[in-house]
Amino acid sequence: MGAASPAGSGPLWWDDAAPPAPASTDPLPLAVDVAVVGAGYTGLWTAYYLLRERPDLSVLVLEAEHVGFGASGRNGGWVSALWPVGPDVLARASGRAGALAQLATLRDTVDEVGRVDEAEGLGSGFTKGGALVVARTSAQADRARAEVEHASSWDTGTVWLDAAATRERLLVAGALGATYTPHCARVHPRRLVDGLAAAVRRQGARVVEGTRVARAGDGVVVLGDGRRVTAGAVVLATEGWTPRLPGYERTVAPVYSLMVATEPLSDEQWRRTGLDAREVFADHGHVVIYGQRTDDGRIAFGGRGAPYHWGSAVRPEFDLEEEVFGALRSTLTDLLPQLSGVRFTHAWGGPLGIARDWHPCVSWDPVTRTGRAGGYVGDGVAASNLAGRTLADLVLGRTSALVDLPWVGHRSPRWEPEPLRWLGVNAGLRLAHLADREESRTGRPARLGALLSRLTAH
């Protein structure tokens, strides 16, 4: 393994981030049609579609830090139709037709992000090369083939590639095969969110950074300094930071995902690696990993493994877990040993939101006129676009196919109080690691896998 990135080197995606927008000298409006809390993907997509439909609306987007500070500016850049819960779970609540509609809309959403990227000149580098998920043990291969068989009844487009076909796309050591779905693109996450913020500002919205919100809902947003903004509708788009809002403390658990990035690879290194179509990649292990080939020829690679922190705490120092960074570097060079000796230049992390049943949702209260979306479990780049379109329809009172999708109005159970939450989330993480080790050692499906599925409720 090559030289490690310095701790705290920061997100690769921020190296060439758009310069901060000049601070407006105009006073903050104290009454607006729509107030959006959070200037990440969900909040900005909501503002974008609201103003595309109703340019006359006054829309205020409030952000405690800067545009793209949260998961929207730190993620792995997968614009995917993947969903944290399976279609059978969706069908139990909404029937087969509802589940099929949700899956089909997610597939179209991947293309919608690409359409807007091109039309608005967002500059995200959207490239739809699909997603390759590799199986390296017989247990992983069994799971992968079962997934393909199950997916065939839901028309997801997921197929099985044998070892030779897998190597044509990515030269992973010991690959027995892989699942492949065409319904996934890669982007530069920060360019996407910066471009979206610029588009929203062009539409006439006020995007105010460095402004903390203490409380929001029921037509009022109370700022950290005590000022109050009244709004005809309020949209909460705070994902991993949601537990900081009064009344939402146990809505989602903020779980950290960390990433590393290599130096730019040479043409020869890429010839011995693959990803010619800019596929994103992962494996069928229990511990989530994910990677992409970046615009400037690096591999950006991430995964779970950082602990959940007591009381749903979110702090800058939690972005930096050197043990996890080391594990990610080792995992990548184990997958791709031809890159042994490559230098790692960046290491970063951040929280994502997970609902108790791992089920993302869009909610809207027509009485208080308060909406919220999130709990994407790390699959939010495309889902946030769908959430923004759906919230726009709900705020405007529009009847559409989007507002009838199964995730709209879904109510997840609240997370358990501490210490049960801390014990449960971290136990799930530990079980995932143990299950992978057992499968690597025995080649058989881990006995812990069923327990892990029950614990994560998906």
Image: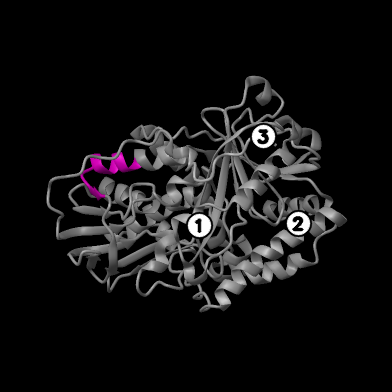
Q: Which residues are magenta?
A: 196-208
Q: Please tell me in which quadrant of the rendered image residue 305 appears.
A: bottom right
How busy is the neighbourhood of tag 2: few (under 14 within 10 Å), some, or many (20 plus)? many
Which structural element holds mark 3?
Answer: loop
Residue 179: % across, % down: 71, 45
- The local secondary structure at tag 1 comes to helix
Seen from this angle, which residue lies furthest top?
A: 267
Secondary structure beneath label 2: helix
Mark sitting earlier along the chain (2/1): 1
How far apart are the alpha carbons under marks 3 and 1? 24 Å
User: For this rendering, which residue is in front, 65 or 286?
Assistant: 65
Q: Is residue 90 left or right of residue 112?
A: right
Residue position marked by numbered label 3 in the rendering = 2
Looking at the picture, how far across and down is residue 362, in whole percent?
42, 63
Query: What residue is pinned by disc 1?
Result: 318
* 405 relative position to 58: left or right: right
Q: Position of residue 201 (x, y in %)?
A: 25, 42
Q: Which amino acid type corresponds to the residue marked 2 in the rendered image?
A: Asp
- Residue 155 seen in the figure: no
